[in-house]
């Protein structure tokens, strides 16, 4: 077994083994709600723990290529994209819902423009909380899963990331009326969103920029679609996910065809050759 494969297996064992049993235990044995942010905290940082353990003790490669620098001065435009892209995806999803006759354009359930601005500020404040997943899935797993094949690797990473979330659909966090169809379109949403995150990582070289976008997905796109389409428009979760998937497709198809996915991830983010992940 190569060092790269062993590193990936150890990482996945920690990411899944530290989260799935925990989720079932706290929900089924302790009765805790998974919507509670304090209950979510160990889940959010388990991928980072896995990546840290592998980098420190399995491969001993260190953290030079981990994307821990902000790189804001060099990539400030893409930082701005990371901040506003989730809002843009939300706007496209709402436009699709309005076209289908599922939404009447009323922003009041979300507090109007003022409420949206507050969510954008909250996105920035909560960015560090999403670093745990990004340090694991985007910074560590994507460059290593299928070396030299960034498009295939982003698809595989997104699929694994989706599966990692599956217990949430059965433990009261996500409510689906039809699990067969809903889980399929939910999985597609994760895979598309991972395209956005990996594109941002390739453009900025910073896991903090992808964490900002991840925060926007949850705190802007997630909250707005829930407030406006589920609470305000009385849609079920499946139709909301379909709207978001279509919006993400419009954004991510051009991204996945871009130059960011034509080179190995290490080269794409501008790392020196010596610092790029080359585990055999």
Image (cartoon, rainbow, N blue to C red):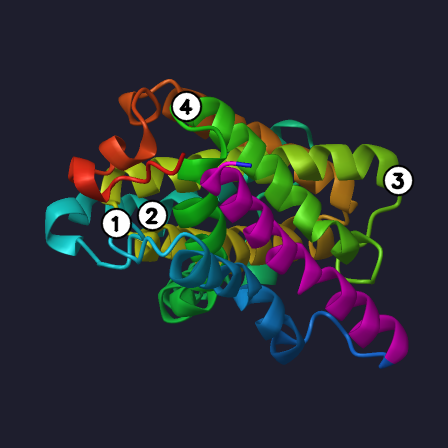
Earlier in the chain: of badge 3 and badge 1, it is: 1
Q: Secondary structure at mark 4?
A: helix
In the figure, 59 relative to 242: above or below? below
Q: Is residue 222 toward the left or the right of residue 85 in the image?
A: right
Earlier in the chain: of badge 3 and badge 2, it is: 2
Earlier in the chain: of badge 4 and badge 1, it is: 1
Q: Which residue position is annotated with label 4?
A: 256
Q: Which quarter of the picture shows residue 98?
A: top right
Viewer-proximal residue among 272 and 200: 272
Q: Which residue position is annotated with label 3?
A: 178
Q: Secondary structure at mark 1?
A: helix
Q: Is residue 208 toward the left or the right of residue 267 in the image?
A: right
Residue shown at 28% from the left, 59% from the top: 68
Viewer-proximal residue among 267 and 251: 267
Q: Secondary structure at mark 3?
A: loop
Label 4 vs label 3, nearer the camera: 4
Whole-percent x, y for residue 236 in the image: 79, 45
Q: Is residue 246 magenta?
A: no
Asked if one can make out residue 98 in the rendered structure from this viewpoint, the answer is: no
Q: CA distance from mark 4 to mark 3?
A: 30 Å
Q: Which residue position is annotated with label 1?
A: 79
Earlier in the chain: of badge 4 and badge 3, it is: 3
Q: Determine whether label 4 and label 3 are within 8 Å by CB.
A: no
Q: Which mark is residue 140?
A: none
Q: Determine whether label 1 and label 2 are within 8 Å by CB.
A: yes
């Amino acid at each position: 077994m190569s060092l790269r494969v062993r590193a990936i297996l150890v990482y996945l064992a920690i990411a899944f083994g530290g989260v799935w049993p925990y989720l079932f235990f706290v929900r089924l044995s302790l009765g805790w709600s998974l919507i509670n942010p304090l209950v979510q905290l160990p889940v959010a940082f388990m991928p980072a723990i896995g990546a840290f353990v592998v980098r420190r003790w399995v491969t001993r490669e260190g953290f030079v290529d981990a994307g821990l620098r902000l790189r804001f001065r060099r990539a400030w435009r893409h930082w701005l994209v990371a901040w506003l892209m989730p809002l843009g995806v939300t706007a496209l999803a709402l436009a699709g819902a309005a076209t289908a006759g599922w939404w009447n354009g009323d922003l009041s359930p979300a507090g109007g423009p003022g409420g949206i601005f507050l969510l954008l500020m909250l996105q920035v404040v909560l960015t560090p909380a999403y670093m745990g997943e990004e340090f694991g899935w985007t910074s560590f797993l994507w460059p290593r899963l299928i070396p030299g094949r960034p498009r295939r690797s982003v698809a595989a990473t997104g699929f694994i990331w989706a599966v990692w979330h599956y217990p949430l659909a059965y433990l009261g966090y996500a409510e689906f009326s039809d699990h067969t169809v809903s889980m399929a379109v939910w999985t597609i949403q994760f895979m598309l969103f991972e395209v956005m995150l990996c594109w941002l990582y390739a453009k900025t070289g910073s896991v903090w920029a992808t964490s900002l976008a991840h925060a926007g997905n949850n705190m802007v796109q997630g909250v707005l679609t829930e407030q406006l389409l589920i609470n305000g428009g009385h849609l079920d979760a499946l139709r909301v996910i379909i709207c978001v998937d279509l919006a993400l497709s419009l954004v991510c198809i051009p991204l996945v065809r871009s130059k960011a996915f034509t080179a190995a991830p290490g080269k794409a983010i501008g790392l020196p050759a010596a610092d790029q992940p080359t585990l055999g």
